[in-house]
Amino acid sequence: MEMVAESMNDDFSRHLNAAIGCLVRETVKEVVAEMEEQRMAAKREKPTQEEHSQQQEYMTRKEVMTLLKRCDSTMTKWAKRGYLVPCCVGGKYLYRKSDVLKLVGK
């Protein structure tokens, strides 16, 4: 009798593991598809470097530090806190002039 119960437990475990594996695979496929869709949407929305430079004016970290009279560590803290975050333009991290001027109050 114990052998039958043990055999049923083994069958149940195998079926359960197969079902879980199937659910995990389907979930992973859905997540990957959603991430790919988001990546493609971001790519479509992301302006080229030329479009960026035509639309925005940028400032270097040193220019911002001089204008705002702040040190390097303050700039780092502000970026981490989301207060004044640089953006990557052409492989360089620059600050939008409009963002900096908002802080100055101009």
Image: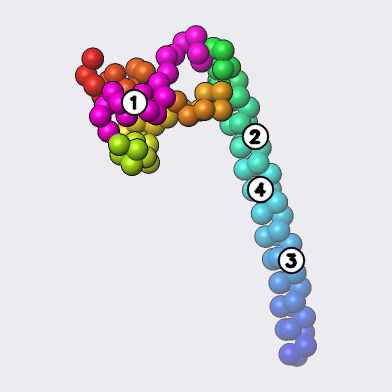
- The local crowd at label 3, few if under 14, some if 14 to 19, many if 20 or more residues have their Cα within 10 Å, is few
At mark 3, the secondary structure is: helix
Kindly report which numbered mark, 4 or 3, lies closer to the viewer in this rendering: 4
The residue identified by callout 3 is 15
Picture residue at 68% right of the left edge, 44% below the top: 29
Q: Measure how far apart labels 4 and 2 are at the Cα level.
A: 12 Å
Picture residue at 75% right of the left edge, 90% below the top: 1
Judged by its main secondary structure, the magenta piece is helix
The residue identified by callout 4 is 28
Report the disc number at residue 64: 1
Residue type at numbered disc 4? Val
Residue type at numbered disc 2? Glu
Picture residue at 42% right of the left edge, 24% below the top: 60
The residues colored magenta run: 52-70
Kindly report which numbered mark, 1 or 3, lies closer to the viewer in this rendering: 1
Picture residue at 33% right of the left edge, 42% below the top: 73
- The local crowd at label 1, few if under 14, some if 14 to 19, many if 20 or more residues have their Cα within 10 Å, is many
Q: Measure how far apart labels 4 and 3 are at the Cα level.
A: 20 Å
Name which of mark 4 and mark 3 comes first in the sequence. 3
The quarter holding residue 21 reads bottom right
